[in-house]
Image (cartoon, helix red, strand yellow):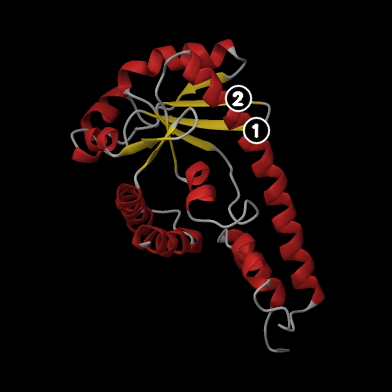
Amino acid sequence: RSTINWLRFIDISHRQHVSGFIHARMAEYPDLPLPKKVLKALSAYAAKTTARNLFMLSAFEQLGAAFEKANIQIVAFKGIDYIERIYSSIDQRFLSDLDLLIKPEDLERTRALLESIGYHCIENIRQSRFHEKRYGYIHAPLQCQKGGVNIDLHIRLGKEQMRINEQVWQEIVPKQNYYVMKPAFALLYHCYHLNKHVCGQGFKLSHLNEFFNHLIVTGK
């Protein structure tokens, strides 16, 4: 339609992180008369996402082997889990980082392990240790980076004393050399995470899309 601002459409799709999803759905509607510039932009985004995700998946495979060798249990969640759990192809969900959950007592060993294989790790303290102890906002105390691979290391899923922090370790299943949440618990966590963005900041349409995909997967 000539009345549609397609440049605006492309911009919103990119900023809301749904361009890959839209591109994948286009295959179901081959006769949809979209402008060439839209098709080109969505295809470019999907290609960029594929390249990035292949790179991140390769890095994660190496990390999984290293953690297994060190006998440190990790749970992969959010993006690195979602691209297999709820997406039909790797070009739909851009992986900006890897979210990994470890047990609090493994934090120092994990840092030593990552630094031994070339990662640079910094403590993620937004306010102060007093602020963290009082409010419990920091649940990803380490951020590690190496050659474009970004890792958020979590020691809990929510604020201190929340049941979800302990319960997660009873709601995981093994993969090759890491763990993921069981479907129902993954949906529960996504609802908690979605609420944080809706009531706080950073909400995107991709969060809502992933919520509905979780419902479909959990209901199977």
Q: Secondary structure at mark 2?
A: helix
Of residue 6 and residue 61, the one placed in the foreground of this image is 61
Q: Secondary structure at mark 1?
A: helix
Residue appearing at x 34%, y 45% in the figure: 182
How busy is the neighbourhood of tag 1: few (under 14 within 10 Å), some, or many (20 plus)? few
Q: Is residue 215 left or right of residue 36?
A: left
**Does residue 31 sit above or below 21 in this rendering?**
below
Task: Give the image location of residue 78, x and y in percent.
Answer: 45, 45
Q: Is residue 63 left or right of residue 181?
A: right
Q: Which residue sits furthest bottom?
A: 2
Residue appearing at x 18%, y 34% in the figure: 161
Task: Give the image location of residue 22, x and y in percent.
Answer: 62, 68
- Mark 2 and mark 1 in contact (Cβ < 8 Å)? yes
Of residue 60 and residue 123, the one placed in the foreground of this image is 60
Question: Which amino acid lies under the numbered mark 1 shown in the image of this protein?
Answer: Ser
Whether residue 208 is visible, yes or no, is yes
**Does residue 18 sit above or below 165 in this rendering?**
below
Question: Which amino acid lies under the numbered mark 2 shown in the image of this protein?
Answer: Gln
Q: CA distance from mark 1 to mark 2?
A: 7 Å
- Residue at which label 1 appears: 58
- Residue at which label 2 appears: 62
Task: Give the image location of residue 16, x and y in percent.
Answer: 55, 61
What quarter of the picture does the C terminus occupy?
bottom left
Of residue 70 and residue 48, the one placed in the foreground of this image is 70
**Residue 199 location, quadrant:** bottom left
Q: What number is the disc on residue 218?
A: none
**Residue 25 location, quadrant:** bottom right
